Image: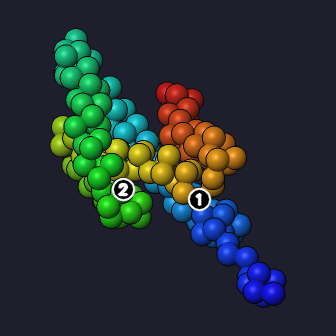
């Protein structure tokens, strides 16, 4: 008698999969990924047009391309900590602030500082991909969600190649 009157409890994680609002954070991360990749492409394009590189000083070009990746490696653990402790929205906000400042500094021809800020902001945005996929889309949707978000990182690079 008591068993029939009790309502079946819904697992909170399963309830998230049924929620239509799960596509809002997906869109937020997707746009953040595209914005960060576009910022890096703008800075890289300015580096390619730099007269020191055109005159044969390729060390400058390669140094900043690898320095960008080094920043990603150095800020991997702080980004992971922020995602786990503060949440995805705070992490994306911080990454977008770094990206915005980087693009502004690039307008004022401060490519060095802009490269550093893009490299710092990238892990705060890129590392939310797997967290978003696991939290909101579950085991069945995780692969396709991660794939679409990673493709979002490649879209600006593809467009940049066509524009050159």
Q: Determine crowd level at label 1: few under 14, some 14-19, many 20+ residues with C-alpha closer than 10 A.
A: many
x 21%, y 23%: residue? 63
- Say how many tags the image has: 2
Asked whether disc 2 touches disc 1, contact meaning CB atoms under 8 Å apart, the reply is no
Which residue is at 63% across, 68% downward?
11
Specify whether 24 is left or right of 45. right
- Which one is in front, 68 or 43? 68
Q: Is residue 14 left or right of residue 68?
A: right
In this rendering, is residue 40 above or below 14? above
The residue depicted at 42 percent of the width and 45 percent of the height is: 126
Residue at numbered disc 1 = 136
Quadrant position of the N terminus in the picture: bottom right
Q: Nearer the viewer, residue 91 or 133?
A: 133
Q: Is residue 155 visible?
A: no
Tell me where residue 18 appears, x and y as whole percent.
71, 67
| Residue 60 coordinates in the image, percent (x, y) | 19, 22
The residue positioned 35% from the left and 44% from the top of the image is 122
Residue named by callout 2: 83
Instruction: Give the x, y percent position of residue 101.
Output: 26, 55
Alpha carbons under labels 2 and 1: distance apart: 15 Å
Q: Which percent across, then down, holds residue 24?
A: 58, 65
Q: Nearer the viewer, residue 62 or 90?
A: 90
On the rendered structure, is 27 left or right of 80?
A: right
Dot 2 crowding, Cα within 10 Å, few <14, some 14–19, many 20+: many
């Amino acid at each position: 008698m008591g068993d029939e009157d009790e309502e079946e409890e819904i697992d909170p994680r399963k309830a998230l999969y049924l929620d239509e609002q799960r596509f809002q954070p997906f869109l937020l991360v997707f746009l953040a990924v595209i914005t960060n990749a576009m910022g890096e492409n703008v800075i890289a394009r300015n580096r390619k047009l730099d007269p020191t590189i055109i005159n044969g000083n390729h060390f400058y070009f390669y140094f900043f391309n690898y320095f960008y990746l080094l920043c990603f490696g150095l800020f991997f653990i702080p980004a992971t900590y922020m995602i786990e402790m503060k949440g995805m929205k705070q992490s994306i906000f911080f990454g977008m602030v770094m990206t915005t400042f980087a693009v502004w500094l690039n307008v004022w021809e401060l490519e060095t500082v802009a490269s550093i800020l893009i490299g710092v902001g990238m892990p705060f945005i890129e590392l939310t991909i797997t967290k978003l996929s696991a939290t909101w889309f579950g085991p069945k949707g995780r692969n396709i969600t991660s794939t679409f978000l990673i493709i979002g990182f490649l879209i600006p690079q593809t467009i940049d190649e066509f524009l050159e």
